[in-house]
Amino acid sequence: MFVILHSGQTGVERGAHDGAVAAGFRIAGFMNATGRDELGPVPEQIAMHLQPAPDAGPRTAVRANLAIAHAAMVVVPKASSADAFPAMDWIMRGVRRRGVPLLICDARTDVHRVAEWSMELREHVETCHVLVTGPRATRWQEGEELARRLVRRLALVE
């Protein structure tokens, strides 16, 4: 079983949330302590799945999600330059430090590779917490739909 982790931000994370709902996955994670995203309050239908981060401050929600993730999927406009986004670079370094599996995706990512990755994850843990993140909608609007499709592909092995 997969549990999709995110922090409630617009863009990729909202797409991951919607994909998880469509696939029937559980959703969890930490949002920032104020319960807000860059546009205002995180919508209730999303916030109800998340806990406020234990501390206020930059990246505390992401740090808390990283601490409970068994794997991470980073969805970006171009996988070969994912580190061009400072937040994604920071997240990927944290994922690598923890030694958890990382899949960097873009629109060219073969959906069969996502399904294979999900099968590999299932071999190691019964309930796999997958952090799905990427740029916010204000930086890349197309990320929401792409994340929605990719998260739904994880369901092929459920």
Image (tube, grey):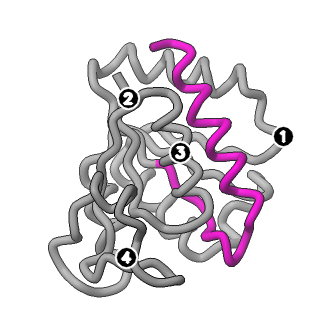
User: Label 1, label 3: how many angstroms apart (C-alpha)?
Assistant: 21 Å
Which dot marks residue 108? 1
Which circle's residue, 1 or 2, is located before the other in the chain? 2
Q: Position of residue 21 (x, y in %)?
A: 46, 37
Q: Which image quarter holds the N terminus?
A: top left
Asked if labels 4 and 3 touch by Cβ distance under 8 angstroms, the answer is no
Which circle's residue, 4 or 1, is located before the other in the chain? 4
User: Label 2, label 3: how many angstroms apart (C-alpha)?
Assistant: 14 Å
Q: Position of residue 22 (x, y in %)?
A: 52, 32
Q: Which residue is mark 2?
A: 2
Asked if labels 1 and 4 touch by Cβ distance under 8 angstroms, the answer is no
Check disc 4 and give the amino acid type.
Answer: Arg
User: Label 1, label 2: how many angstroms apart (C-alpha)?
Assistant: 23 Å
Tell me where the magenta segment starts and ends, as one range.
Answer: 132-158
Q: Which residue is mark 4?
A: 59
In the image, residue 24 sits, relative to residue 99, either above or below, namely above
The residue at 33%/30% (across/down) is 128
Q: Secondary structure at mark 2?
A: strand
User: In which quarter of the view is residue 89 placed?
Assistant: bottom right
User: In which quarter of the view is residue 2 placed?
Assistant: top left
In the image, residue 38 sits, relative to residue 120, either above or below, namely below
Q: Nearer the viewer, mark 3 or mark 4?
A: 3
Task: Check disc 2: other Cα within 10 Å, few if <14, some if 14-19, many if 20+.
Answer: many
Q: Secondary structure at mark 4?
A: loop
